[in-house]
């Protein structure tokens, strides 16, 4: 299960129709899952907070967000979302491929705005609150898109593209695009490679030697680098990631605890149970019985 499947598990479908790569769905923390681990992808993502509050991390910088806030995540940016204390967080997640807005003949809109954004030219800011001058116009574009998605009328694709073009106009109107894309920090790019590797291989056995070799680091240098970047040892992060995925599987499936532990990469059931209880303060079975929706 990848992060995309994790966020959208109950719908059991791909994010995008290949012919129109736009999708939106509602999420609730902790009802659907306790958190979304730090990850990245090539699609543009918008997180629209509907109720409650929580914590969003973008490129290793964390911020508290609350009802009404709009978080914009550019392609390639590291991001994650988690609960703040015991407060319920409801949000809309919107993902779309920027290529759907680009012209095939590479017109000025594509060259000046979307291509730089595709290549790590980040937005002027990631979080808009109701106090921001641009907020109402940005929120209006998203609200109009939501109305279209309630009924999907004939030619809805044109309406959604119109909303997105309006959104980007508001984002880009007041600041100039630099001549060259910004270069992400090399350390951040290396971390993105590591986190994507974990996302794709956490169900397998991963050793320090293997992941260090994958990064072209020595084991000792890798361990120092990862702990400095993430604030925890790699094995701690890996086990925490696996437990987060296990919690989602416990809520979304009827698989046995043994099957879930094996699915997320734990080789020993007793070890899985101990780690799970340490993180969630209850056994996997109790977690399923008390937290499962319905």
Image (cartoon, helix red, strand yellow):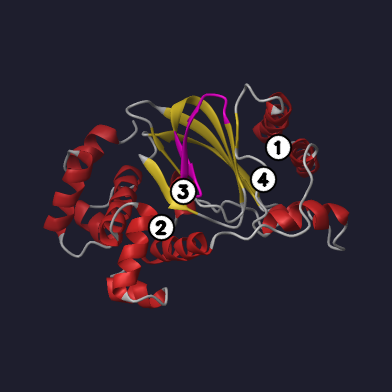
Mark pair 4, 1: CA separation: 29 Å
What is the secondary structure assignment of the residue under circle 1? loop
Whether residue 89 is in magenta: the answer is no
Nearer to us of marks 2 and 4 is: 4
Disc sitting over residue 60 in the figure: 3
**Neighbour class for label 4 at 10 Å: few (<14), some, many (≥20)?**
some
Looking at the image, do the residues carrying marks 4 and 3 touch, with CB atoms under 8 Å apart? Answer: no
Mark pair 2, 3: CA separation: 23 Å
Mark pair 2, 4: CA separation: 30 Å
Write down the quadrant of residue 29 in the picture: top left
Q: Residue at x 67, y 35 (%)?
A: 149
Image quadrant where one finds the N terminus: bottom left
Q: Earlier in the sequence, mark 4 or mark 1?
A: 4
Mark pair 2, 1: CA separation: 29 Å
**Neighbour class for label 2 at 10 Å: few (<14), some, many (≥20)?**
some
Residue at numbered disc 4: 123
Write down the quadrant of residue 135 in the picture: top right
Q: Earlier in the sequence, mark 2 or mark 3?
A: 2
Q: Position of residue 63 (x, y in %)?
A: 47, 35
Looking at the image, do the residues carrying marks 2 and 3 touch, with CB atoms under 8 Å apart? Answer: no
Residue range in magenta is 55-69
Mark pair 4, 3: CA separation: 16 Å
Q: Position of residue 25 (x, y in %)?
A: 55, 39
Q: Earlier in the sequence, mark 2 or mark 4?
A: 2
Residue at numbered disc 1: 152
Q: Nearer the viewer, residue 151 or 76?
A: 76
């Amino acid at each position: 299960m990848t992060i995309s499947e994790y966020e959208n598990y109950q719908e059991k479908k791909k994010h995008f129709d290949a012919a129109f790569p736009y999708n939106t769905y509602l999420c609730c923390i902790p009802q659907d899952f306790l958190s979304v681990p730090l990850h990245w992808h090539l699609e543009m993502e918008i997180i629209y907070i509907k109720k409650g509050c929580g914590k969003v991390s973008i490129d290793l910088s964390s911020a508290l967000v609350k009802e009404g806030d709009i978080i914009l995540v550019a392609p390639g940016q590291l991001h994650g979302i988690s609960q703040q204390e015991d407060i319920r967080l409801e949000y809309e997640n919107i993902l779309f491929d920027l290529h759907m807005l680009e012209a095939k003949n590479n017109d000025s809109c594509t060259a000046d705005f979307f291509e730089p954004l595709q290549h790590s030219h980040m937005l002027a800011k990631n979080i808009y609150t109701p106090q921001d001058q641009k907020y109402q116009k940005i929120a209006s574009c998203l609200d109009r898109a939501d109305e279209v998605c309630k009924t999907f009328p004939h030619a809805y694709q044109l309406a959604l593209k119109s909303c997105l073009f309006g959104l980007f106009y508001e984002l880009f109107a007041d600041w100039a695009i630099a001549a060259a894309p910004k270069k992400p920090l090399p350390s951040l790019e290396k971390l993105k490679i590591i986190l994507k590797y974990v996302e794709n291989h956490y169900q397998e056995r991963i050793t320090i030697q293997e992941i260090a070799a994958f990064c072209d680091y020595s084991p000792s240098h890798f361990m120092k680098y990862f702990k400095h970047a993430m604030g925890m040892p790699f094995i701690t992060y890996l086990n925490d990631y696996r437990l987060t995925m296990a919690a989602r599987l416990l809520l979304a499936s009827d698989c046995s605890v043994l099957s879930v532990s094996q699915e997320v990469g734990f080789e020993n059931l007793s070890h899985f149970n101990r780690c799970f209880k340490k993180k969630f303060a209850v056994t996997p079975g109790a977690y399923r019985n008390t937290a499962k929706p319905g």
